[in-house]
């Protein structure tokens, strides 16, 4: 018998913290002057805020986060050590040094600088010369290194980011997104804890010149320990920040602000709001069934679904009614169904923001049903198809 076409099936899940009849969509729980912004809770993966998060934007100095990731990855693999040195070329000295008018560590021409010092200069001083020195030391030319940056971005699942240089200075076709900057920053924090610490250093001295960290969040006593600021005329003022407080950590990226002061205020307000305005709630325990999906032609008409581990989410403290959830899957599912097969996804939203997606798997095996069961399912599908 010819297989009947599966149809798109959406099952709505009622939660204790959600209303049976959700209110009409309203504005987000928080507003920011940033043109693009994205914030996420590092532990649960809950998206706390999103505004034009996937809009391509010039990276400015935030591109240096990818420069650092490529270098950190090489250090972790053992290709380089912190005590290894790179030479300061005339190109790095001329286009990234004091005469260039940009951020610099004042590296001396034809000198050799330890990798650890270059890391500190880039993390604290946002040193353009330091980035070019790293790029040339690792890949011969900055152009070659920029290709390494883009290739590495793809390996990390950053599908929209494109890099043309190691510094983030304006270049045609060089773009990032707020979401991918946050994803990159979380990756650096998780994979390179021994190097992430450099982003929190308050100052760094090189060539007898001491410079303060350009990240304003570090001086606000809000638990900030990273990461980078950026500015170009095209991008406006931008920042990627992270704070850790009360056993929680959140990351945020903001871009398109009008001034250094606005960047400081908006990033502080967003991160502080993200830390104060949400409460962690366990929706389902480890192994707990979330819902059931319809099975076509099976020994049972439904299969229970569960996640791999508990499902926790951050719920707005003062707007709990804004939390909604639904389970989405293509169904009914064709029998047989093997236990552990991914069937659908639990999508949790806070207001207008899709906050969290969790894969759901078959909690048991459902075999093929009897001829009578399959005939009844076929009749049901024919009726539903006709009504559709």
Image (spheres, rainbow, N blue to C red):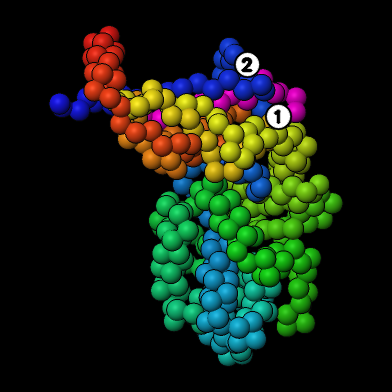
Q: Position of residue 125 (x, y in %)?
A: 69, 68
Reading the chain from its start, which is encountered first: label 1 or label 2? 2
Q: Describe the element under mark 1 as helix, strand or loop.
A: strand
Q: Which mark is residue 19?
A: 2
* Direction from residue 98 to residue 222 in the image, left or right: right
Report whether 292 appears left or right of 369: right
Magenta: main secondary structure = strand
**Going 82% across and 55% down the picture, which residue do you hit?**
219
Outermost residue, right side? 221
Q: Which residues are magenta?
A: 316-330
Can residue 334 be spotted in the picture?
Answer: no
Residue to which mark 1 is pinned: 316
Asked if 232 appears above or below 285 in the picture, the reply is below
The structure residue drawn at horizontal position 67% and vertical position 66%, both measured from the top left corner, is: 193
Task: Identify the residue shown where x is 41% and y is 68%.
Answer: 147
Q: Quadrant of residue 210?
A: bottom right
Instruction: Using the rendered image of the protein, determine whether residue 341 is visible from the camera's viewpoint.
Output: yes
């Amino acid at each position: 018998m010819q297989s009947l076409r599966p149809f798109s099936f959406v099952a709505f899940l009622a939660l204790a913290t959600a209303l049976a009849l959700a209110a009409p969509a309203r504005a987000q729980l928080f507003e920011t002057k940033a043109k693009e912004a994205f914030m996420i809770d590092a532990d649960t993966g809950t998206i706390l805020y999103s505004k034009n998060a996937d809009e391509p934007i010039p990276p400015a100095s935030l591109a240096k986060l990818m420069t650092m990731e490529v270098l950190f990855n090489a250090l972790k693999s053992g290709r380089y050590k912190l005590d290894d040195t790179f030479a300061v070329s005339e190109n790095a000295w001329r286009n990234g040094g004091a005469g260039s008018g940009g951020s610099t560590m004042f590296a001396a021409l034809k000198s050799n600088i330890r990798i650890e010092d270059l890391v500190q200069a880039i993390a604290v001083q946002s040193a353009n010369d330091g980035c070019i020195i790293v790029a040339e030391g690792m890949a011969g030319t900055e152009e070659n290194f920029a290709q390494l940056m883009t290739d590495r971005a793809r390996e990390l699942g950053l599908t929209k980011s494109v890099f043309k240089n190691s510094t983030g200075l304006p270049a045609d076709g060089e773009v990032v997104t707020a979401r991918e900057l946050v994803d990159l920053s979380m990756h650096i924090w998780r994979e390179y804890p021994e190097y992430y610490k450099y982003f929190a250093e308050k100052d760094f001295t090189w060539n007898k010149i001491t410079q303060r960290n350009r990240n304003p969040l570090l001086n606000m006593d809000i638990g900030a320990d990273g990461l980078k600021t950026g500015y170009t005329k095209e991008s406006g003022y931008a920042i990627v920040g992270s704070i850790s407080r009360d056993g929680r950590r959140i990351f945020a990226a903001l871009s398109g602000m009008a001034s250094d002061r606005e960047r400081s205020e908006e990033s502080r307000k967003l991160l502080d709001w993200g830390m104060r305005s949400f409460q962690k709630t366990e929706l389902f325990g480890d192994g707990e069934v979330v819902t059931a999906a319809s099975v076509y032609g099976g020994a049972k008409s439904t299969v229970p679904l569960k996640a791999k581990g508990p499902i926790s989410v951050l719920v707005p403290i003062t707007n709990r009614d804004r939390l909604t959830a639904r389970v989405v899957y293509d169904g009914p599912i064709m029998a047989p169904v093997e236990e552990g097969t991914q069937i659908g996804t639990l999508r949790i939203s806070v207001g207008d923001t899709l906050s969290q997606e969790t894969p759901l798997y078959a909690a048991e095996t459902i075999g093929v049903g009897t001829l009578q069961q399959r005939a009844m399912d076929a009749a049901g599908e024919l009726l539903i198809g006709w009504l559709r």
